[in-house]
Image (cartoon, grey):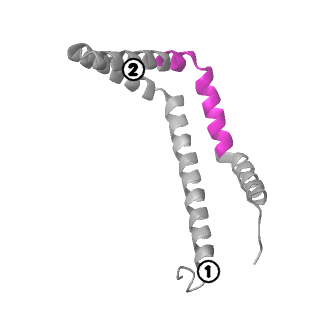
Amino acid sequence: MTHYSKEDILKKAEAIADKIGKMELVEIYRQAEQKIDKNKKVQDLIAQIKRLQKESVNLQHFQKHEAYKQNEAKIDALNKELNSIPIVQSFRQYQEEVNDLLQFVSSDLTQKVLKALEQTESPNSFEK
């Protein structure tokens, strides 16, 4: 049985992360993210939403129910506007695809580690 140090495992994990980072899908995601970061309209909408969200927290804390509802309606309207912008839609699609990829890799790795552990356990490993 091959033994690996923690450092060996971390180096292999870093190599996997590097390979994932160089995938075409991840590159496209990064480009979409840069477009969003450079888009003034998108950034203005995000800033407005964040400001209103902070206000909503305060309004809720001070039990200003009607003002809170109005604020939330403004947030919803801004979110709809933001979500209607094509580069935001593209970014979210790529973000979802990258997230799915990462979830798959994580799940697959977990399953393989558990399978390897099951194969190396002796039948009496939990007995005293």
Q: Quick check: 21 left or right of 103? A: right
For the residues carrying marks 1 and 2, which lies nearer the camera in this image?
1
Q: Position of residue 109 (x, y in %)?
A: 61, 63
Mark 1 or 2, nearer chain start:
2
Q: Quadrant of the C terminus?
A: bottom right
Which residue bears the numbered disc 1?
A: 119
Of 86 and 95, nearer the camera is 95
Which residue bears the numbered disc 2?
A: 53
Q: What residue is drawn where x is 74% and y is 54%? A: 10
Q: Is residue 41 magenta?
A: yes
Question: Residue placed farthest to the left in the image?
Answer: 66
Name the amino acid type tagged 1.
Gln
Name the amino acid type tagged 2.
Gln
Q: Position of residue 46 (x, y in %)?
A: 48, 20
SS under mark 1: helix
Q: Position of residue 42 (x, y in %)?
A: 52, 20
Q: What residue is drawn where x is 54% and y is 54%? A: 103
